[in-house]
Image: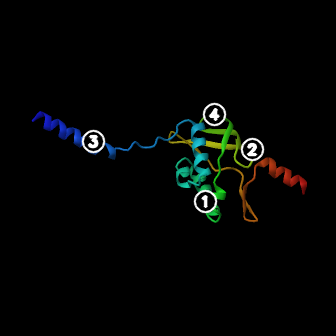
Amino acid sequence: MNVIRTILCFTALLAVLPGCKQEETKPDAPEEVLKQYQAYIDKNKFGEARELSTPAGRQWLSELEAIISNEQSDSTELDTRFLSLSCEGQGDTLVCACVLKDQYERYTADYRLVRLEGKWLVDAPEEEIIIENDLIESVPDSLLEEYLMEE
C-alpha cells in the first residue's frame, strides 16, 4: 500500500511540475535594465520594452512602433552591442552615457533612467524621431549640430 501511495504521489508531482513555469526575472541594476531594454528595441519587442519604461518612455515607444510598423521588419531589427556603459547621478535619476555599436555604425548615446516604485525604468529620449525619405533616424545631438552648422 505504501508503494502505491508513493507512486501516486510521485506521479502527481510529475504531472504538476511542467505547469510550474519560472517567471522571467526582471533586471534590477540600471545598467542591466538598459541592456535588456535595448535588446527588446533591437528585436522590435515594444511590449516588453514598455515594461522597462517610464510613462513618457512608453508613449515614445508607441510612436516609434507606429513608424516602424510601416517598414520591413528585417530592416528594422538591430544587433546593438554596448562597448561602454557608465551611469551617473544622484537619487532616483541617472544618466547613462554609452558607446554602442550595431551592424551599421558605432555611436554614442545618453539614456535617462528613473527609479519609480523601486524599479529602474528607461525614460523617453530627449532627441526626436525624424522621418526623412522613409528613413527613420534618431539623430544624436552631435550630428544635429553638424547639420545645423553646414546650413
Q: Which mark is residue 106?
A: 2
Distance from label 4 to label 2 (Cα)?
A: 28 Å
Amino acid type at circle 2 is: Arg
Label 1: how many residues lie within 10 Å, few (<14), some (14-19) or many (20+)? some
Q: Earlier in the sequence, mark 3 or mark 4?
A: 3
Q: What amino acid does circle 1 point to?
A: Glu
Q: Residues within 10 Å of mark 2 (few under 14, many from 20)?
A: few
How far is mark 3 from mark 4, CA to CA?
49 Å
- Depth check, mark 2 against mark 3: the one in front is 3
User: Mark 1 = which residue?
Assistant: 65
As drawn, is 52 to the left or to the right of 4?
right
Secondary structure, mark 3, is helix
Tag 2, which secondary structure? strand
Residue where numbered disc 3 is placed: 14
Residue type of the residue flagged with mark 3? Leu
The local crowd at label 4, few if under 14, some if 14 to 19, many if 20 or more residues have their Cα within 10 Å, is few
